[in-house]
């Protein structure tokens, strides 16, 4: 009976992962127990270590084992370029997919007054300190293209203007290989208005 309780607890615990419902959690639990106990033990060991040892970088606020993350401690990165993102995952995505060699600042969210998320909750005081003290010449706003993401980008742009820092916004529009007939009208409109010379 205790085994059955532990099995339920395992399945319930796996449901804390995004996109994992009870059925998926059940499949994962049975797979690990029946076919890959060694992998399950390794996963639990690394997961416990990560939960205890990964914190936030003191400068950019991404996830890091050290006080300063690899990007912030890398002397070859360009201190004059700062890319502002909503989550630590965004820094990974941008760094892997682009040739960006500047630094980052992670908001850990976006402005949403209805949800009680204001400038203090997204670290605007820390970002403004970076604007004042660092030699930033351009801030690249890479927030999501939601209403809240757009409002957050606009707000940061207004603050940056006080320090005569150029702000740019990443382009949003038609994905590579996308066909116009399958693109929704708001995305197409955004892409059309954001056109540039070739």
Image (tube, helix red, strand yellow):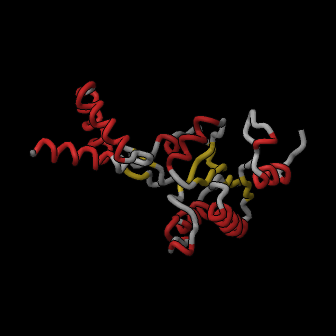
Viewer-closest of 37 and 166: 37
Q: What is the quadrant of residue 130 in the picture?
A: bottom right
Residue depicted at x 37% and y 44%:
65
Position in image of residue 143 (x %, y %) = 63, 55
- Residue 197 visible in rendering: yes
Q: Is residue 23 left or right of residue 82?
A: left
Viewer-closest of 95 and 137: 95
Position in image of residue 155 (x %, y %) = 66, 68
Viewer-closest of 190 and 169: 190
Position in image of residue 196 (x %, y %) = 87, 46
Viewer-closest of 134 and 50: 50
Q: Is residue 171 left or right of residue 20?
A: right
Position in image of residue 181 (x %, y %) = 81, 42
Please tell me how many numbered marks the rendered image carries: 0
In the rendered image, the vertical position of residue 178 relative to residue 63, given as above or below: above
Q: What is the quadrant of residue 186 in the picture?
A: bottom right
Residue depicted at x 26% and y 38%:
44
Residue depicted at x 66% and y 35%:
99
Q: Is residue 145 left or right of residue 96?
A: right
- Residue 136 visible in rendering: no
Residue depicted at x 71% and y 50%:
170
Q: Residue furthest right?
A: 197
Query: Quick one: quadrant of the C terminus?
Result: top right
Query: Quick one: quadrant of the N terminus?
Result: top left
């Amino acid at each position: 009976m205790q085994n059955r309780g532990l099995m339920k607890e395992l399945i319930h615990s796996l449901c804390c992962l995004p996109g994992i419902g009870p059925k998926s959690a059940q499949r994962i639990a049975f797979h690990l127990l029946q076919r890959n106990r060694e992998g399950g033990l390794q996963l639990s060991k690394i997961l416990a270590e990560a939960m205890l040892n990964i914190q936030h970088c003191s400068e950019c606020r991404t996830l890091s084992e050290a006080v300063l993350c690899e990007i912030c401690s890398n002397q070859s990165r360009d201190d004059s370029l700062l890319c502002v993102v909503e989550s630590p995952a965004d820094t990974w995505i941008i760094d892997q997919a682009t040739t960006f060699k500047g630094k980052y600042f992670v908001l850990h969210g976006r402005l949403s007054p209805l949800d009680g998320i204001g400038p203090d909750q997204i670290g605007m005081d820390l970002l403004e300190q970076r604007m004042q003290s660092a030699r930033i010449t351009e801030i690249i706003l890479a927030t999501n293209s939601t209403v809240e993401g757009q409002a957050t980008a606009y707000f940061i742009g207004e603050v940056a203007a006080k320090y005569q820092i150029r702000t740019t916004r990443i382009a949003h529009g038609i994905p590579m290989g996308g066909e116009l007939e399958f693109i929704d009208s708001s995305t197409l409109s955004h892409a059309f208005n954001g056109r540039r010379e070739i």
